Amino acid sequence: MTDERDVDLQRALALSAVPVPPEIDARILDAAGRRRARRRWPLAAAGALMAAATALFFAFRPAPAQARDVNHDGRVDVLDAYRLARAVEAGETAPRWDLNRDGRVDRADVDGIMTALVSLQ
Amino acid sequence: MARFDPDAAGLAAAYREHRDWVVALAYRMTGDRDDALDVLQDVFLWLFGRVPVELTGTLRSFLYPAIKHRCIDRARRRRKVVPLRGDLELAWDGGLEDGDFRRLLARLPEEQREVVTLRFALDFQLDEIAAALAIPLGTVKSRLHYALVALRP
């Protein structure tokens, strides 16, 4: 592609150099550094959010099936819900009855068992 | 398709590598040094704000439309140039010496002048021109061919 005419064209069209003042260089290079820093914080925030979500999940996760077997007969069934309901009525406050780990022994713990019973999983 | 996602040092290196032709091209297009320096800043701040980007060609073919559109905006704002054919209002002659060649170049249709400038002033490869202008490679070749025929003494 390069012949004499091309060389003439290149010479004729050569761009004139435009000096760039150092303050403009500095401004743009500073922006390059700041841009990279800005791109890091969303990653850090996402990491922190993920850690918090994980901690919340483990703090409030549903009671495992073993914990719901309150009458210790090897099964989780309506009898466990009944046994727990009796405990709630009796005003039991021992942590072992607090299946949903919300700090209280109440109807919500019984509901947890019933929900697990009717779950399709 | 290449991903452009450098760290701060890479962005600075990209700036240093492309600075001179960006500002020179902006000067060619606007005919005004202050406008050219403004375009230089605008283009790189825009680039830094966009990374990571997927490049269909080279970085300079990615930058070219951004430079061109900013030059058109500035030329229109300052109303310093004579409108050419179509809706482009680029000067395209910043830093060019007066003479026969300039007159010949001015007679070319805008789209041919643009291809000639990219090829011979910026040494773009044909596929880079195609990527920069978002046109098929065959169109680049035909525009260049007709431009060279028109420029032939």
Image (cartoon, helix red, strand yellow):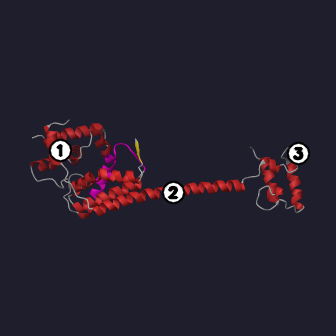
**What's the residue at 87%, 57% (across, down)?**
A85
Q: Residues within 10 Å of mark 3 (few under 14, many from 20)?
A: few
- Asked whether residue B90 is in view, the answer is no
Residue type at mark 2: give it. Pro
Residue A16 falls within the magenta-colored stretch = no
Q: Check chain identity for marks 3 and 1: say if they share one.
A: yes
Q: Residues within 10 Å of mark 1 (few under 14, many from 20)?
A: some
Left or right placement of residue B24 versus residue A47 in this view:
left
Whichever of callouts 1 and 2 sits on the residue coming sooner in the sequence is 1
**Which mark is drawn over residue A116?**
none
The residue to which callout 2 is attached is A42
Q: Is the N terminus of chain B in the top left, top right, bottom left or bottom right quadrant?
A: top left
Identify the subunit bearing mark 3.
A
Camera-side residue: B55 or A94?
A94
Q: The magenta stretch spans which residues? A: B52-73
- Circle 3 sits in a helix, a strand or a loop, which is it? loop
- Circle 2 sits in a helix, a strand or a loop, which is it? helix
Camera-side residue: B86 or A57?
A57
How far apart, in angstroms, are the residues tagged by discs 1 and 2?
47 Å
Whichever of callouts 3 and 1 sits on the residue coming sooner in the sequence is 1
**Which mark is drawn over residue A73?**
3
Q: Position of residue B63 (x, y in %)?
A: 32, 50
Residue type at mark 3: give it. Asp
Identify the subunit bearing mark 1.
A
